[in-house]
């Protein structure tokens, strides 16, 4: 299965609006017992989360996985920091690229692939306000063209 495909649990659509995504990486997640059950139930949120490299390891900070309903006292902390599983070469490459000013690691989507929870992280560069406006204009123009094309086909 190609990178980024599987049963999508959560997407970070705001990341595409706020950042230029230069490159994407697929990473595994280190999860506790009830976290994978909550993910399979679709109870995750990537809003305001980011990845950070600490001591040669990549961690996901700020991702919210709601507690599992049948988890009783063994439930997990919803906002805990989670370790991401990447190859050493990928981590070394990310260390070099994130040291440049303006680049950060942003989670794009979390999905299940062959029974395992995976996360797609992107090397991102922040957009300025005029870039965001330009993207909105392009999107509106494309929508208008499609609408006109559909109306022309009806006639």
Image (tube, helix red, strand yellow):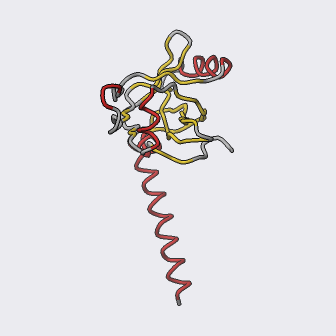
Residue 97: x and y, percent?
58, 22
Can see residue 43?
Answer: yes
Can see residue 131?
Answer: no
Q: Is residue 153 above or below residue 108?
A: below
Residue 31: x and y, percent?
48, 27
Q: Is residue 51 above or below residue 137?
A: above
Residue 33: x and y, percent?
45, 28
The one of 106 and 72 positioned closer to us in this rendering: 72
Task: Give the quadrant of the N terminus.
Answer: top right
Residue 130: x and y, percent?
41, 44
In the displayed structure image, the side of residue 51 where residue 118 appears, left or right? right
Tell me which residue sits at (35%, 36%) in the image.
68
In the displayed structure image, the side of residue 10 where residue 120 appears, left or right? right
Q: Quadrant of residue 72?
A: top left
Return the residue found at the far top.
55
Tell me which residue sits at (58%, 39%) in the image.
115
The number of numbered discs placed on residues in the rendered structure image is 0
Tell me which residue sits at (44%, 37%) in the image.
37
The one of 115 and 13 positioned closer to us in this rendering: 115
Q: Quadrant of residue 96?
A: top right
In the displayed structure image, the side of residue 63 where residue 27 appears, left or right? right
The one of 31 and 121 positioned closer to us in this rendering: 31
Q: Quadrant of residue 35?
A: top left
Return the residue found at the far bottom.
155
Q: Is residue 19 above or below residue 147?
A: above
């Amino acid at each position: 299965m190609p990178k980024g495909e599987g049963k999508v649990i959560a997407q970070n659509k705001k990341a595409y609006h706020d950042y230029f995504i230069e490159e994407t990486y697929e990473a595994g997640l280190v999860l506790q017992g009830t976290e994978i059950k909550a993910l399979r139930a679709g109870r995750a949120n990537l809003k305001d989360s980011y990845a950070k490299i600490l001591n040669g390891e990549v961690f996901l900070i700020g991702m919210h996985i709601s507690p599992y309903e049948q988890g009783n006292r063994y439930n997990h902390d919803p906002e805990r920091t989670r370790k991401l599983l990447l190859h050493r070469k990928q981590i070394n490459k990310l260390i070099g690229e994130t040291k440049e000013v303006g680049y950060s690691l942003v989670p794009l989507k979390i999905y299940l692939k062959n029974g395992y929870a995976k996360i797609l992280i992107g090397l991102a560069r922040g957009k300025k306000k005029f870039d965001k406006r330009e993207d909105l204009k392009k999107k509106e123009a494309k929508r208008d063209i499609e609408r006109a094309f559909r109306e022309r086909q009806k006639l």
